Amino acid sequence: MQQLAIEAQKHQFDSIHALIEKEYTIERDSFSKGIPEIVVPKNKPSSFNIDYIWAYMVINQGKAEYFRLVIQTSQEKKIDGVARFTFNIDDKISDIFIQSYMAHESYNGNYYEIPSGYAVDFLKSIKIGSKVKMKISNWETYTTRNVTSKEINNIVKTYKYYRELGGELEAPDLIDE
């Protein structure tokens, strides 16, 4: 009985992984025999100097290990000391508060890698076709932009695959009680 359950689980993983291979780029670490696999969207920007939101996940030995929401800000939209991202998703407000380890600076823009545990309200609120406006703010200033349906649809799909492969909400500094 247990063997059948294991085989069914492997078949489900193989089916989902086959879809992922068609729609995503799978980056493998050449120093660790290709495990874990980093799954990124094929249309991910090649530069950080583009205002864009996307997501990636890591698959390790047949299970989704972690999910990251990546928010890129160009030099024009760059704000020093970002404290919060506020999203208006179909007239529902969702906030993501930034921890220092999430922020990364580049010479031509910034990017933020946000663990799923910090983006839970955002991830539960978006769906294919959602209308989303984003506000980037520190304690003194802010900037806004509309998020494209292409960006939202990719995040929704990546998170769906992440959950189907056993991924759970997580963040390195959040402790389950």
Image (cartoon, grey):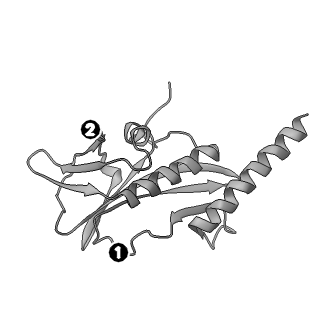
Q: Residue at x 47, y 32 (%)?
A: 175
Image side of residue 115 versus residue 7, left or right: left
Q: Is residue 48 visible?
A: yes
Closer to the camera in the image, 111 or 122? 122
Res 47 label = 1
Looking at the rendered image, the disc whose residue lies closer to the viewer, 1 or 2, is: 2
Disc 1 crowd, CA 10 A, few/some/many (<14, 14-19, 20+):
few
Vertical side of 118 occupied by 65: above or below: below
Q: Could you tell me residue 29's position as x and y percent?
A: 60, 69
- What amino acid is at disc 1? Ser
Res 91 label = 2
Q: Residue at x 42, y 38 (%)?
A: 120
Disc 2 crowd, CA 10 A, few/some/many (<14, 14-19, 20+):
few
Tell me the quarter of the picture where residue 14 sits: bottom right
Identify the residue at the far front of this view: 129
Q: Quadrant of the N terminus?
A: top right
Q: Could you tell me residue 142's position as x and y percent?
A: 13, 51
Image side of residue 157 versus residue 95, left or right: right
- What amino acid is at disc 2? Asp
Vertical side of 89 occupied by 42: above or below: below
